Image (spheres, grey):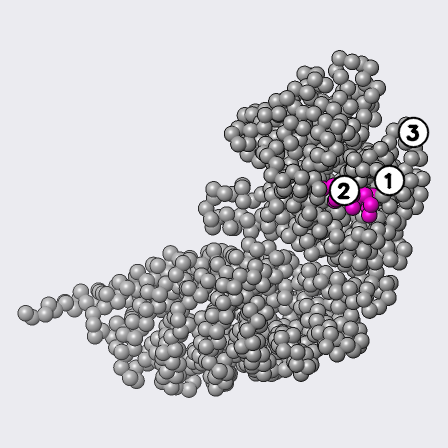
Amino acid sequence: MTPRVIPSYLLSFLLAHTRWLNNLGNAFSRRFEHLGELRDIENAILVNQQAVDLTPDGHADKARQLVNLGNAFQTRFEHLGGLRDIENAIIVTQEAVDLTPDGHADKAASLSNLGAAFQHRFQHLGKLEDIENAILVNQQAVDLTPDGHPDKARRLANLGNAFQTRFEHLGKLRDIENAIIVTQEAVALTPDGHTDKAASLSNLGAAFQRRFQHLGKLEDIENAILVNRQAVDLTPDGHAERAARLSNLGNAFKGRFEHFGELKDIENAILFKQQAVDLIPDDHANKAAWLSNLGTVFHSRFEYLGELKDIENAILVKQQAVDLTPDGHANKAGWLNNLGNAFSRRFEHLGELRDIENAILVKQQAVDLTPDGHADKARRLANLGNAFQTRFEHLGKLRDIENAILVNQRAVNLTPDGCAGKATLLNSLGITFTSRFEHLGELRDIENAILVSQQAVDLTPDGHADKAGWLNNLGTAFQCRFEHLSELRDIENAIFFKQQAVDLTPDGHATKAGRLINLRNAFQSQFKCLGKLEDIMEATVAYKQATKNMTSRPLTRYDAACHWAILCSKHQSPSSALDAYTMVLEIIPQVVWLGQTVHHRYEELPKIGKTINAAVAMAISVGDLPRAVEWLEEGRSIVWKQILQLRTPLDELHQQHPDIADELLRVSQALDNAGTSSFQNIFQNIDLEIKHRSAEEEAQNHRRLAAQYEQLLQEVRGLDGFGSFLRPKKFSELAPAARDGPVVIINVHDSGCDALVVCPSTNIIHVPLPMFSYDEAVKMHSELISSLRAGGVRDRETFQNFTNYAVSTFILKEILRKLWVFVAHPILSAVEDILYENTHDSLPHITWCATGAFAFLPLHAAGIYEPDGPTRNVPVNISDFAVSSYTTTLTAMLGSGSKLKQDLTKTSSVLIVSQPGTGKGFLPSVAREVEVIQHYTTSDHTCHLTNESATVGAVLVKMSKYEIIHLACHGIQDIDNPLNSAFALSDGRLDLNTLMRLSLENAELAVLSACETATGDEKLPEEAVHLAAGMLAVGYPGVIATMWSICDPDAPLIADKVYANLLGHRDNSDSQKAKLTPAYALHEAVKHLRKEVGEMNFVRWVPFVHFGV
């Protein structure tokens, strides 16, 4: 069949149409490059494809139109990262090259475009053959372009880029040398004023920077900054490439900063990268890249200064970069990797577990999206390994360190010798080997750690910013082996390398404190081996320097201050130890920071309590009793005081400076809500990804509020007359807490036990308690728990089922005897003269404020109980001498005392909340308990919520309207999460976390007739994390609570006597005269219960306690 011949007139028309389509496609492409609107590049591909399809094979225009179509595919690939686009670009551009005869004027241009396509695919897939092909065809393009040709410089620049890319993959010096040579030639060939001049300079700057990173020669990074600045200066405002060149200049400054650590360089890097981001609209193809780069420089400044706002900004912009990048895009993995690094660093700073979980999640995604053979695969594996390592250090799960070693080893194996990043990967692997050695103790691990850490050090040139870190880690590995094998050479090496690390780390650097601590550890290990005092002196100096490095993590500085204090206590003067402990107290608010959730603050507190006790013991030892009281007050109930501080009235400030008072009030209220909010409950039904972002926004907002609050406090303290505004109270301000009777503070520590008695009318009385110790208190608390278990004390409804009553009674009797003989009796003897000063006919009142395990012991019941013994008729228990209360802090008493009702003739209103329950949890005596309370109240002063009406919401609303609340229900003490301790109501739990968000003005008394309402958390003895403390914090000046589960029938009996003494009979006006304060009312009620159930039935009457005033 004869081929159909297209008439010449029709062929001419078609060719004219294809050229028009081709030109239209090119126009769409150019507009896309200028505005970045996806619709334009879609149209460009559409019409370029039509032009190709309409051009007959063999026609001279076919190759050119294929090139234009390939360029359009390549441009869309750069925007969306779709693999199919770059594959199509290579196919059609290769076809164009094949169609173009040698010697044709367009051959070099087609080869150059093909080289760019190969290079793009290499960057996506990381296959070496692609970058080899890119160099090959770019070299051909250059060779085919005669000298003097206007495109010679551009093709040289493309060849230079290809060499530079292969250098980044293989690390061979020859490639970066070639890149610089050909790019310099491109710059030289491009006349001043030419539009390509700036692009060539920018490429040359990148090549100089790469060689600097490899060789560390100062002239290279100086040249990089110089030519990148020239590129920016040559690019006019409004030019499409101005943002890219600003970003490249920022990269150069960042590179110099990372090497030399000069702060002004990272400031410039942030400045130029922020300008680049600001120049690009949100829908531009390169917006995500610039955002991720900006995040990286914020991250770098955080590493140097340790300021939280920098890592917060890094996470913010890196998350935006990820969100702007569609799935499947070539750069998605890179942006995820960068985001993961930022999450890891914030975790190391704040310790929020959610951050390291997020870091592992996004880094794993980055690794999964990175194909095998990709140039960045090793680096992303190493970053994932580092995240596993960090979580291992936090949680101690062996699987994490195994995963860390596995992925770090893969990263090292994938990286050829000579590659610029090899040292970093070896260092990471060394850290993981050291961690596993510390966990499992296998010698092979520490040998491997030293080997690869030494390699990392050897590969890193002097002057490199990372050199100090690698030396520090090598020193740590040597120290670990010394502690295992005790070979002196190892500890000498450890000190040698750690000293170098410290010397190379500039003062003010965020890592300085940590490296000083590591050096101190090495000196201390050597001291244990050789006993040389100069080692201890060196260690002390290192700790002191670390403490004063203000840019380091607060927890690092806190640890350094604690060790400084310990060494001073053992080897130097008490005054130097006091100086160290003063620094400890100053750092604690930064460790237990308002910008963290309450739950996280409680996680940090167990490590703080014993340090406070040690500080107080040191102050007592030198006779500085006011300071001892101040420090105890400052170090106890830290979280409660933070919450109450946010609720402090600002009346005086408002009168003199209303504007700043209003702003402080607004921030305080927002911060109060942020610290105690329960994000998990609010967002439990929201999509996981949205929930994650919302949680991140909430957390960042919380920390911003905390920083704003601290700034406002500084401003207020700068005002005339407000210098001490909301600062820790001095003893002169705390002393009025003892206005109604002495307050006995008991400090227990490894070095001994002391009581400090704050009296209404005299100086502090110090009562040494030499027969008691920290270990004895802990042992006694353990015995108390055992006795309660033996007595069947689990909860209110099963209380009667005693399993071993005799054992329980014996243990409790012995505990109460020891408390009397070794604690209570010596204290009462010391204060006997002042105890009865103003008591007239009534018993004096004494308030206990105990630390450590003492906080869980029943001091109020201390005594010798021998019904048949020689002392049966002699008062030998504390209740015969005084009425006891407890307090969490002196500050709590100061605030509560002013709220006590002075008019005892006025009838208080009572909110009764009862929840008898059902089934196994049924409390049969609750109904009787309610009846006896109502006997002493009137209907217009009482509200009773019970069963279905006793909901969490209803109780919260009513609490603000009644002065007394009586809760007769189950109480739940949550040991794992103290803030979940709660009262069980009809529709759920009224937990401590919820109560903490209340602030009541008219409250007088809370009676918690539930179990375990004053039990507390044994890991947090100084914090009083129990329901009774929660009620004090929300505004009740007095709380009646229970130290352990009570017997159900005892609740109505106690209620009857308490309310009889508290309110009097509603039909007997004479009884008004007999009204007692809550502490005395409970004292009388317990005395009655003790007679009813028997004095030796300790588990029944001892648990009832009064808190407050």
The x, y position of residue 571, in whole percent, is 82, 69
- For image coordinates 41% across by 62% down, the residue present is 329
Q: Amino acid at mark 3?
A: His
Local packing at callout 3 (Cα closer than 10 Å; few below 14, some 14-19, many 20+) is: few
| 1034 lies above or below 234 | above
The x, y position of residue 23, in whole percent, is 33, 65
- For image coordinates 80% across by 52% down, the residue present is 772
Disc 2 element: helix
Mark 1 sits on what residue?
742
Asked which quadrant contains residue 962, the reply is top right
* Residue 954 in sight here: no
Asked which quadrant contains residue 994, the reply is top right
- For image coordinates 90% across by 27% down, the residue present is 841
* Chain-order first, disc 2 or disc 3: 2
Q: Nearer the viewer, residue 407 or 825?
A: 825
Q: Nearer the viewer, residue 530 or 376?
A: 530
Q: Which mark is residue 816?
A: 2
Disc 1 element: loop
